[in-house]
Image: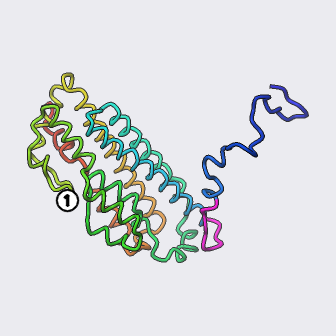
């Protein structure tokens, strides 16, 4: 490419006139997106705090979109597309896990200088994260009370509370493939949080003992484990970032802070897929 007066010339075919056509900024609604940051203080580091959480919310929006797709694909016995969606969500969580390293550059002293302007605003109130938890099986009807002042968010969570989870869809897929999934599992109350079902462990053991004959089931089981690991790493990195920033202070939303986040590490979406490992090859 020609260099004129030290500057690279624009290629002849590159579009430059957008008076009557859509450009990059229009397609991405960048005017709206880049004007959506409204610091309350004049502290230099508050934009970091806002952008960190806004970008996470964008990724959570995509994760929820993909998980709805995974559920639909499993319902249609399209396991290949379901697996692609699970892989994408896994990478989304890996990305937002790494984002914590940026927020971790915010020191306790710096955060303390503007933390007070947050009022009761807290990540605990992220309805998209709660929606992801719901569709993966960690349902809690009492959480809807937090979103009563936001009708759209409340409606989303109420719909997901009443809907089967990704795991429900997978178990129904297994049943259609001839696996002995208990009837009470297939007809369970989907409004309830998932709790481990001992009778499912032999189903998974049979799959893991003959992976060649049951590769789609086996591979999807491992995809689900990958996803759970990715979510757990995100939770752990969140905990460590909070701990290094505010220590053991109460959260802005009134939670116990680090203790609350630590308790979340005990939550699991697919417990039988971990239990079955103790009986493989031994």
Q: Is residue 150 above or below residue 186?
A: below
Q: How is the image coloured?
A: rainbow
Q: Is residue 271 above or below residue 159?
A: above
Q: Is residue 41 magenta?
A: yes
Return the residue found at the far right. 5
Q: Crowding near pointer 1: few (<14 within 10 Å), some, many (20+)? A: some
Q: Which residue in the structure is indicated by mark 1?
A: 192
Determine the residue positioned at 77% across, 41% down.
Answer: 17
Q: Quadrant of residue 16?
A: top right
- Residue in front for this viewpoint, 52 or 17: 17
Query: Residue 69's x, y, as percent?
Result: 36, 42
Query: Residue 206's x, y, as percent?
Result: 12, 31
- Residue in front for this viewpoint, 116 or 240: 116
Q: Main secondary structure of the magenta part?
A: loop
Return the residue found at the far top. 212
Determine the residue positioned at 10% across, 47% down.
Answer: 198
20 relative position to 166: left or right = right
Tell me the quadrant of the picture where the N terminus can be found: top right
Query: Residue 4's x, y, as percent?
Result: 89, 31
- Secondary structure beneath disc 1? loop
Q: Quadrant of residue 112?
A: bottom right
Q: Is residue 20 above or below residue 127?
A: above
Determine the residue positioned at 66% across, 56% down.
Answer: 31
- Residue in front for this viewpoint, 41 or 76: 76
Tell me the quadrant of the picture where the C terminus can be found: top left
Q: Is residue 40 magenta?
A: yes
Q: Which residues are magenta?
A: 35-45
- Image label count: 1
- Residue in front for this viewpoint, 218 or 172: 172
Determine the residue positioned at 45% across, 48% down.
Answer: 62
Query: Residue 193's x, y, as percent?
Result: 21, 58
């Amino acid at each position: 490419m020609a260099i004129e007066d030290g500057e690279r010339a624009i290629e002849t075919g590159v579009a430059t006139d957008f008076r009557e056509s859509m450009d990059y900024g229009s397609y991405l609604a960048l005017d709206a997106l880049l004007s959506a940051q409204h610091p309350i203080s004049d502290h230099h580091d508050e934009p970091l705090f806002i952008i960190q959480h806004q970008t996470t919310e964008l990724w959570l929006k995509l994760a929820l979109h993909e998980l709805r797709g995974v559920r639909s694909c499993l319902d249609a016995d399209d396991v290949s597309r379901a697996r692609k969606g699970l892989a994408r969500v896994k990478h989304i969580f890996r990305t937002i896990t790494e984002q914590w390293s940026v927020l971790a550059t915010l020191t306790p002293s710096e955060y303390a200088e503007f933390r007070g302007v947050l009022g009761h605003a807290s990540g605990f109130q992220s309805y998209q994260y709660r929606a992801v938890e719901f569709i993966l099986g960690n349902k809690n009807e009492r959480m809807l009370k937090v979103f009563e002042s936001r009708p759209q968010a409340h409606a989303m969570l109420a719909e997901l509370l009443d809907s089967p989870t990704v795991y429900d869809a997978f178990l129904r897929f297994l049943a259609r493939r001839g696996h002995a999934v208990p009837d009470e599992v297939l007809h369970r109350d989907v409004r309830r949080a998932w709790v481990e079902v001992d009778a499912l462990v032999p189903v998974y053991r049979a799959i893991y003992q003959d992976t060649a004959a049951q590769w789609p089931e086996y591979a999807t089981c491992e995809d689900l484990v990958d996803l759970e690991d990715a979510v757990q790493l995100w939770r752990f990195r969140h905990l460590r970032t909070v701990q290094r920033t505010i220590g053991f202070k109460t959260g802005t939303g009134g939670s116990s802070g680090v203790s609350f986040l630590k308790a979340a590490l005990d939550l699991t979406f697919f417990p039988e897929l971990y239990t079955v490992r103790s009986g493989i090859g031994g």
